[in-house]
Image: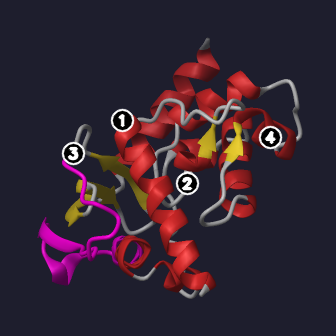
């Protein structure tokens, strides 16, 4: 009990040292709010039930507001550049630095963290993997349900592509931003991958 309380206090203290900033992007999938500090990106929040553009339309990403461009931290700059590339020129994401993450999920040694890093590293743009396959990749073939929990805990969707995790039946399954958003992201990646193949 005491160790849990200490962990909460130290986490709270660690958080109070962050100068948290927010950037809001307008994207083809609606408003995306990014929060972070000088150490890394804290969260990416997707708007549920956003009005989604057709994948064939020209994608654009614009800043709606932020705490001041001169004050924007390097991790937030990297994150916004990465997201802009993802929607507009996906092949560029490989050439851009991955923004650092500063969220408790990545600071604790856990199955969730292991699954998220495995997903980021092993499931490429335009690919999909089942919950069971991702459990196998993460080293625990019996943990498909735990993989679902890890996807719900993902603080940085799109960058860590939890939308690429689908049901074994081929159904898209649930998604924090809604199933329409998940289907849009999968279609966007499939279309962009097909364009690159030509």
* Quadrant location, the N terminus: top right
Q: Is the residue 17 above or below the residue 182 in the image?
A: below
Confirm or deny contact between disc 4 and disc 1 (CB under 8 A): no
- The percent coordinates of residue 176 (x first, y second) are 40, 35
**Mark earlier in primary sequence (1, 3):** 3
Q: Nearer the viewer, mark 2 or mark 1?
A: 1
Q: Position of residue 3 (x, y in %)?
A: 63, 22
Q: Residue at x 41, y 79 (%)?
A: 85
**Residues marked 4 and 2 touching at CB (< 8 Å):** no
Q: Residues within 10 Å of mark 2 (few under 14, many from 20)?
A: many
User: Of marks 4 and 2, which one's residue comes earlier in the chain?
Assistant: 4
Q: The magenta stretch spans which residues?
A: 51-80
Residue carrying label 4: 133
Query: Distance between the Cα atoms at labels 2 and 1?
Result: 14 Å
Q: Secondary structure at mark 1?
A: loop
Q: Does the magenta-highlighted stretch encompass residue 185? A: no
x and y percentages locating residue 163 in the rendered image: 52, 47
Q: CA distance from mark 4 to mark 3?
A: 30 Å
Label located before the other in sequence (4 or 1): 4
- The image quarter containing residue 79 is bottom left
> Decide: marks 4, 3 in contact (CB < 8 A)?
no
Q: Residue at x 68, y 52 (%)?
A: 119
Residue at mark 4 to residue at mark 2: CA–CA distance: 15 Å
Neighbour class for label 1 at 10 Å: few (<14), some, many (≥20)?
some
Upstream in sequence: badge 4 or badge 3: 3
Cα distance between the residues tagged 2 and 3: 18 Å
Labels 2 and 3: the sequence-earlier one: 3
In this rendering, the label closer to the viewer, 2 or 3: 3
Q: In the rendered image, which quarter contains the C terminus?
A: bottom right
Q: Which residue is mark 1?
A: 178
Contact between marks 1 and 3 (CB within 8 A): the answer is yes
- Residue under numbered circle 3: 50
């Amino acid at each position: 009990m005491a160790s849990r309380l200490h962990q909460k206090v130290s986490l709270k203290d660690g958080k109070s040292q962050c100068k948290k900033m927010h950037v809001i992007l307008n994207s083809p999938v609606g408003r995306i709010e990014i929060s972070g500090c000088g150490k890394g990106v804290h969260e990416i929040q997707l708007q549920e039930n956003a009005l989604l553009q057709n994948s064939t339309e020209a994608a654009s990403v614009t800043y709606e507001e932020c705490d001041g461009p001169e004050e924007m931290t390097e991790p937030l700059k990297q994150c916004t550049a990465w997201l802009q590339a993802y929607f507009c020129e996906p092949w560029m994401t490989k050439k851009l630095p991955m923004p650092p993450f500063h969220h408790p999920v990545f600071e604790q040694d856990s199955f969730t963290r292991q699954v998220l890093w495995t997903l980021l590293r092993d499931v490429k743009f335009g690919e999909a993997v089942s919950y069971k396959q991702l459990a196998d990749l993460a080293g625990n073939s019996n943990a498909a349900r735990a993989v679902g929990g890890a996807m719900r805990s993902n603080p940085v969707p799109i960058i860590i592509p939890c939308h690429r995790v689908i049901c074994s039946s081929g159904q898209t399954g649930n998604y924090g931003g809604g199933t329409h958003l998940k289907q849009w992201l999968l279609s966007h990646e499939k279309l962009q991958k097909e364009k690159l193949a030509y």
